[in-house]
Image (tube, helix red, strand yellow):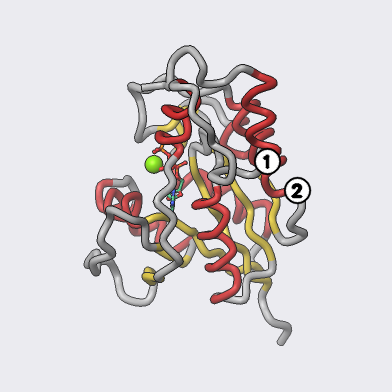
Amino acid sequence: MTQKRRLGIMGGTFDPIHHGHLVAASEVAHFYSLDEVVFVPTGLSSHKPDRRITPAEDRYLMAVIATASNPRFSVSRVDIDRPGPTYTVDTLRDMRKIHGPDTEMFFITGADALEKMLTWHDTDELFGLAHFVGVTRPGHRLADPGLPNGRVSLMEVPALSISSTECRERVHAGEPIWYLVPDGIVQYINKRDLYRDAPGE
Ligand code: ATP
Ligand code: MG
């Protein structure tokens, strides 16, 4: 029997993508011997209905730019091309369709997002579709979330206290974001004039 392909899936608003996202994906990929990690920028986020989110094409392109140099990282349009708010169960169903039954899927998520998982719809189906990997995030303790055994793992990654919110606020305030995000993202944000007027909140 050939070994199943191991695919990481990292969903996020990525407004903008930053080194916290990239380190988390890289660490999980190493620890779980993943063949590939797909970054999936959300359409309208069901978790952030009130915030003005940067157009999907900009968030998608930033994810492409940030992951371009890593041969094991890629970006998917499934969530931004599906109308309406993004639900993780739809993301996983689409990825299952695209990658077929011979792929083992690992959904990578931060501790904060993992906590919210209990409130998500279709949790039974979710855990049937993928293994969930919750990673540490500064300010969010990684407690056992009390989820079904064997379908959720917790993993410590080097703590980078970077958030997209802080990046947006820094740009708005005229402060640098060099080294918090990849160089190409600093340049893309400048070129497209993102976050300058309103940090998005
Ligand atoms: P925002 O501040 O707008 O909420 P964010 O930095 O949390 O943005 P998201 O796009 O919301 O970024 O996050 C996507 C996923 O990455 C989530 O599962 C989140 O928990 C995780 N994540 C974000 N930042 C980090 C970080 N610094 N370390 C580990 N995981 C992170
Ligand atoms: Mg967040």
Question: Residue drawn at (68%, 41%), measured in percent from left and top?
Answer: 183
Amino acid at circle 1: Asp
First of labels 2, 1 by sequence position: 2
Rendered location of residue 102, percent (x, y): 66, 70
Q: Is residue 171 above or below residue 146?
A: above
Q: Residue furthest front?
A: 175
**16 left or right of 155 in image:** right
Q: Position of residue 54 (x, y in %)?
A: 53, 23
Provide the residue designation for mark 1.
183
Q: In the rendered image, which residue does mark 2 sit on?
A: 68
Residue 187 position in % (x across, y down): 69, 30
Mark 2 secondary-structure assignment: loop
Query: Does the numbered disc 1 mark a residue whose Cβ is under 8 Å from ligand 1?
Result: no
Q: Position of residue 51 (x, y in %)?
A: 37, 22
Camera-side residue of 110 and 20: 20
- Quadrant showing the C terminus: top left
In the image: residue 14, left or right of residue 111: right
Ligand 1 neighbours mark 2 (CB distance < 8 Å): no
Instruction: Return the residue nearer the eye: 55 or 146.
Output: 55
Please tell me whether residue 97 is drawn above or below residue 32 in the rendered image. above
Residue at 28%, 64% (x, y): give it: 142
Residue in front for this viewpoint, 116 or 81: 116
